[in-house]
DNA sequence: TTATAATTTTAGTTTCGCCTAAAAATATGT
DNA sequence: ACATATTTTTAGGCGAAACTAAAATTATAA
């Protein structure tokens, strides 16, 4: 139906649109590791296919059709990421590059069966929600500790870094999966923070730690 | 490393070379659903990459390097076929088209982990051997009954057609998985045959049956 | 406001993998 | 052996998706 290049553009535009709703040629070029001139060419083509609105010198935004296609690509991407992590034991940071290729496999039946085989997972290994078959996207439940608002109770649900040394460091700080905590103060410039644990203990953590721990609402 | 188009040529040449060791431009074009002129172009390119020997108007044959690459593609193809059939429950005849796409995913680690996850399978769902990591290809163990030599003892190890009506027909003929038999006579033109069963019973079967039953050496 | 900077588009090429049409080489039949 | 048929290659072109260089537009700052 669509070429891999087209799918990659659609997907990237969708992601950029999450951050800012008008997507510029330059930001797209940077994300896609390509030149602005190439982006302009593709935007014209995708506009002709009615997947996005495009106004010269202004920017672009996905149409309803374009969003639907973006979500189906993202669904496949995240299902494969789940597969690679859960079934094949790939590490958190290795799955993306491979899923980037797998997401382009053309077979509706494959997606249906993969989803069922994996037990209809709702979140990928990064905590990002997996759109359902109809393209519905539920809100993220898992966040980097570094992004969690101060004062809001949270529970640790995953770590990104599985090195023995990192896990040992967490142990020393009394941090582990299922630990309840409240972020007490946050220095925006370096993301370090004080954490109030359920035990009443207060621990000081660095940016290196808060960028490797995932939390969700308590 | 190599484009999908290049990989497809290499793989197809390998398959044709199993049947006849010089591979002609026309036979390749037919298999690849393309035109002879396109094949000539690609043969020149692959020769430049030292993946095959090519002599104008004569034909081509894979080099050692070419064969190595062919076997790694075939390995990936058959591993994915096994996955689709065994884990996702796809039918025998649905797996090929999807594996045709999956075989091009670039990740050595993926192949290693997939192989381990599947339990290092030695044969794909069609009974074709899966080359091992070093490219070693063991002989096929499973053959269509229609291709089995007369007089050689065999044991039924799989059926291709899983329709209830077909299985019922087999039951009437006292044929089932693990049935020991000897093909007694074979009419080359229609592949029908007499089978001598271990029970001493002799059954007459049609081409429709012998083309849907897999046997291996007893 | 006006010069300068940044962004974006246009125009013209390139590479890849395919095509058609025509020419060249090889194979076949009498 | 020779005319005819088949196979294969050459030559020239096309569309997709990238590129560079230059022109056009929009943004910024004195």
Image (cartoon, coloured by chain):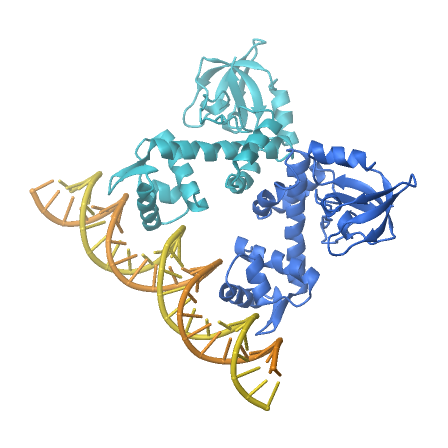
Chain colours: A cyan, B blue, C orange, D yellow
Q: Position of residue A43 (x, y in %)?
A: 32, 44
Residue positioned most to the right: B200
Q: Is residue A16 visible?
A: no
Name above or below for residue A207 compared with residue B20.
Answer: above
Q: Residue at x 56, y 68 (%)?
A: B48
Residue C30 in which image quadrant: bottom right
Is D26 placed left or right of A22 in the picture? left
Q: Position of residue B176 (x, y in %)?
A: 81, 36
Residue B196 in which image quadrant: top right
Q: Position of residue B104 (x, y in %)?
A: 57, 48
- Count the labels in the image: 0
Q: Between A99 and B145, which is closer to the camera in this rendering?
A: B145
Q: Is residue A153 visible?
A: yes
**Image quadrant occupied by the C terminus of chain B:** top right
Is A57 placed left or right of B146 in the picture? left
Is A161 placed left or right of B37 in the picture? right
Q: Residue at x 56, y 10 (%)?
A: A198
**Image quadrant occupied by the N terminus of chain B:** bottom right
Residue A116 in which image quadrant: top right
Q: Position of residue A158 (x, y in %)?
A: 58, 23
Name above or below for residue A128 compared with residue B170.
Answer: above
Q: Between A104 and A182, which is closer to the camera in this rendering?
A: A104
Q: Between A56 and A136, which is closer to the camera in this rendering?
A: A136
Q: Residue at x 44, y 20 (%)?
A: A186
Q: Between A138 and B29, which is closer to the camera in this rendering?
A: B29
Is A174 placed left or right of A108 in the picture? right
């Amino acid at each position: 139906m669509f070429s891999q290049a087209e799918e990659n553009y659609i997907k990237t535009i969708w992601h950029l649109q999450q951050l800012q709703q008008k997507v510029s040629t330059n930001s797209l070029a940077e994300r896609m590791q390509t030149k602005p001139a190439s982006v302009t060419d593709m935007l014209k083509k995708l506009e002709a296919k009615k997947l996005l609105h495009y106004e010269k010198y202004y920017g672009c935004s996905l149409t309803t059709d374009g969003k639907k296609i973006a979500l189906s690509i993202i669904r496949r991407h995240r299902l494969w990421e789940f597969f690679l992590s859960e079934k094949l034991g790939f590490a958190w940071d290795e799955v993306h590059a491979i899923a980037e290729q797998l997401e382009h496999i053309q077979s509706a039946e494959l997606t249906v069966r993969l989803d069922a085989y994996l037990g209809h997972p709702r979140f990928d290994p990064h905590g990002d929600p997996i759109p359902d078959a109809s393209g519905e996207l539920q809100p993220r439940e898992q966040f980097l500790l570094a992004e969690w608002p101060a004062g809001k109770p949270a529970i640790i649900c995953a770590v990104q870094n599985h090195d023995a040394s990192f896990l040992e460091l967490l142990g020393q700080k009394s941090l582990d999966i299922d630990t309840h905590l409240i972020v007490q103060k946050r220095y925006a410039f370096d993301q370090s923070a004080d954490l109030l644990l359920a035990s009443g203990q207060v621990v000081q953590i660095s940016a290196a730690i808060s960028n490797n721990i995932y939390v969700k609402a308590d």
